[in-house]
Image: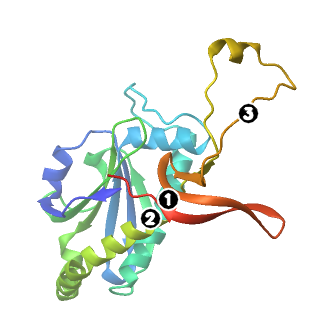
Amino acid sequence: MSSFPPEVKSFDEYAANIDGFMSMNISRMEELRGNMMMVIDPTFISILTNAYYGGKIEALKSRRSEFTTTEDRLIELITKGLNEVLQDAWNDLTPTTISYQSREINPQFASFVDGSDLVIICSFVVQLPNIDAASFDIIYPLQILKPIASQLRSRVQSDISEDNETWRERMEKAVLEIPLKVKAKLSEPKLPMKSLMNLKQGDVFPIQIGEGVEILMDDELLFRGEIGEVSGQAAISLTSRITKI
């Protein structure tokens, strides 16, 4: 998931650039004395509904004008989950209680703010496997954020200095946790096709084992080792690292 820099527009400008059928979920930010709104594309809702109930992750191409009962239930779950995450995030800056208020599907009927009021639009993109990316928006009226403008500015400045280090730490942790397949290669005998086709149970053919065993990680030759035993289990002692050119 990635985010775009926040945009400031009038609500009318924003509504003019989205479809007439959307999931628009309004929640109350009690301490800020105003509302926020989450706007989710209906295609994204369909994808999440299918995936949640064990179906394929795929987009429906048919146009609709209302959500199914099952989709309504999933919208409730999504709204509840996002509200909890947002409340935790806002509480790092200022005490905030976020509670669900209402839902609308047509921007013209969303009783959120007046059309001429300025809003801050925070857009997010979610990349899903094998289909186009999906998006959703979180919208705040500019008016309710003015009392904490200085706190927001100071937070943004501190986040900029910390962001690169935090990103590097997350990336390093993710890379170090990638599982790798380790294999020990004893020998690679070669047989003519005729002999291979005539093999049967009980047949024995000789193999040659060189000095040491080759150790591969994800099919990359990295070490040589010796076969042995530790605590009653077969084991390999790494004797040298192979430098690949």
What is the secondary structure assignment of the residue under circle 3?
loop
The location of residue 179, given as percent across then percent down, is 54, 57
Mark toward the viewer: 3 or 2: 3
The amino acid type, in three-letter code, at marker 1 is Ile
Residue sitting at 15 percent across and 52 percent down? 12
Residue sitting at 13 percent across and 51 percent down? 13
- Few, some or many C-alpha atoms within 10 Å of disc 1 (few <14, some 14-19, many ≥20)? few
What is the secondary structure assignment of the residue under circle 2?
helix
Q: Nearer the viewer, residue 68 or 123?
A: 123
Mark toward the viewer: 1 or 3: 3
- Cα gap from disc 1 to disc 3, whole angstroms: 38 Å
Asked if the residue under mark 2 is in contact with the one under mark 1, i.e. CB atoms within 8 Å, the reply is yes
The residue to which callout 1 is attached is 178
- Which of the labelled discs sits on residue 110, or is there none? none
- Work out which quarter of the rendered image holds the N terminus and state it: bottom left
Residue sitting at 30 percent across and 49 percent down? 109
- Few, some or many C-alpha atoms within 10 Å of disc 2 (few <14, some 14-19, many ≥20)? few
Q: Can residue 86 be seen in this view?
A: yes
Task: Report whether 44 appears left or right of 162.
Answer: right
The amino acid type, in three-letter code, at marker 2 is Ala
The location of residue 126, given as percent across then percent down, is 36, 50
Q: Is residue 100 visible?
A: no
The amino acid type, in three-letter code, at marker 3 is Pro
The residue to which callout 3 is attached is 206
Judge whether 82 appears above or below 192 on screen. Answer: below
The residue to which callout 2 is attached is 174
Q: Going from the N terminus, do you reach mark 3 or mark 2 first?
A: 2
